[in-house]
Amino acid sequence: MSPIPSPLSFENYAAVFDPNLGFGRALLNSTIVAGTTTILALVIGTTTAYALARLQFRFKQLLLTAIIATAMFPTVTLAVPLLKLFTMIGWINTYEGLILPTLSFALPLAVWNLTSFFQQMPRDLENAAMIDGCTRGRAFRLVILPIAAPGVLTTAILTFFGAWNEFLVAVTFANRPDMQTATAATSKFTGATQFDTPFGTQMAAGVIVTIPLIGLVLFFQRRIVAGLAAGAEK
């Protein structure tokens, strides 16, 4: 029996983009939320991780443990308190209400991954740059970041994946169709009647949601390998 249906039909894929379902808007919302979360996690996480990897201060190991511990809380345990808080300050059905909870789980993992990566880099790189007249900040920007690009890209991909696939935050803090992300919109597809579940449309939407993730992996895979090779050459 052939795994490919005959005749081949793309009817379910066309149904996904029915204007009444608002799936196109949901994809845009997912892109905004996941993209913003990834950018913020990298900007904050890179500088924080570098400070934790290079600077010496009291309770540094305790701070690292506390950072990773914050990522261990299940999302469901924070959903109700955050829902009450966001209702009070008017953040329901806003990008802020979708991005900040997602960032609170993505940032600790980004800091932890990047800290481990920076700790493996030799300190002679900064020392050589500072002997040539660079400040520590300039040495970080001009020397460390270019060489650390593979680790930063890997962290960015993992962060984007987590933010893109986030479901509980999306269904809890956005109930308007125009603010739902793709994962939440897919779960709310309805059939012709209340007893009809459009499995074909939902599966087609699942494939469409997965395509950007596969594209990112294929696109950045070569760049990560090239960055590692370039760093070894230098």
Image (cartoon, rainbow, N blue to C red):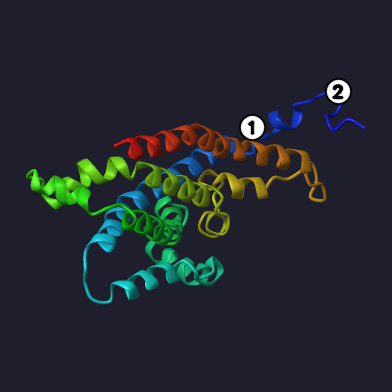
Check disc 1 and give the amino acid type. Phe
* Residue farthest toward the top in the current orientation of the protein: 7
Secondary structure under tag 2 reads: loop
Is residue 111 found left or right of 21 in the rendered image? left
The front one of 113 and 168 is 113
Q: Quadrant of residue 44?
A: bottom left
Which image quarter holds the N terminus? top right
Residue 167 x, y percent position in the rendering: 58, 55
The front one of 146 and 19 is 146
Mark 2 crowd level (few <14, some 14–19, many ≥20, 10 Å Cα): few
The front one of 143 and 19 is 143
Q: Earlier in the sequence, mark 2 or mark 1?
A: 2
Residue 143 x, y percent position in the rendering: 22, 43
The residue under label 1 is: 17
Mark 1 crowd level (few <14, some 14–19, many ≥20, 10 Å Cα): some
Check disc 2 and give the amino acid type. Pro
**Disc number placed over residue 150 in the picture, else none:** none
Is residue 146 found left or right of 163 in the rendered image? left
The residue under label 2 is: 7
The answer for how far apart the CA atoms under marks 2 and 1 are is 22 Å
Residue 234 x, y percent position in the rendering: 29, 37
User: Which of labels 2 and 1 is toward the front?
Assistant: 2
Q: Is residue 222 above or below residue 58?
A: above
Residue 33 visible, this angle: no
User: Residue placed at 72% from the left, 41% from the top?
Assistant: 203
Residue 111 visible, this angle: yes
